Amino acid sequence: MFMSRRSFSPEFKLEAASLVLDQGYSIPAACKAMGVGPTAMRRWVEQLTLERHGKTPEHGKAMTPEQRRIQE
């Protein structure tokens, strides 16, 4: 049986990662609150941390509005 891969908007990823970085959630608690797996959450938290330090993602879509403008 084939399961389709879910995709998430940059806004959703930003909200999820912000739970950990800004609101003090643990990764497991944020995963439960947002209904996503820990691997994705860790990846989003890492990406948001890098974006907040001015690094534009090489692959994929940026989460923050500033970094999205840079990508365009």
Image (spheres, rainbow, N blue to C red):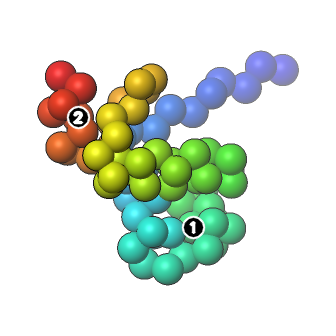
- Please report the residue visible at 18 percent of the width from the left and 31 percent of the height from the top: 70
Mark 2, residue position: 68
**How far across and down, in percent of the image, does residue 54 sit?**
29, 46
| Crowding at mark 2 (Cα within 10 Å: few <14, some 14-19, many 20+) | some
Mark 1, residue position: 30
- On the question of residue 14 being in view, the answer is yes
Q: Are marks 2 and 1 in contact (CB under 8 Å)?
A: no
**How far across and down, in percent of the image, does residue 28 sit?**
68, 68
- Please report the residue visible at 65 percent of the width from the left and 24 percent of the height from the top: 4
Q: Is residue 36 left or right of residue 44?
A: right
Q: Is 38 placed above or below 5 here? A: below
The answer to which image quadrant residue 68 occupies is top left
Amino acid type at image mark 2: Arg
Q: Is 46 placed above or below 67 here? A: below
Q: Is 65 placed above or below 49 here? A: above
How far apart are labels 2 and 1 at the CA level?
24 Å
- Please report the residue visible at 33 percent of the width from the left and 35 percent of the height from the top: 56
Q: Element under label 1?
A: helix
Q: On the rendered image, what quadrant is the C terminus found in?
A: top left
Q: Is residue 28 left or right of residue 52?
A: right
Query: In this view of the protein, which residue sits in the foreground, 18 or 71?
Result: 71
Q: Earlier in the sequence, mark 2 or mark 1?
A: 1
Amino acid type at image mark 1: Ala
Q: Is residue 15 left or right of residue 65?
A: right
Q: Element under label 2?
A: helix
- Please report the residue visible at 34 percent of the width from the left and 40 percent of the height from the top: 55
**How far across and down, in percent of the image, does residue 10 sit?**
35, 41
| Crowding at mark 1 (Cα within 10 Å: few <14, some 14-19, many 20+) | many
Q: Name the disc covering residue 52, or none.
A: none
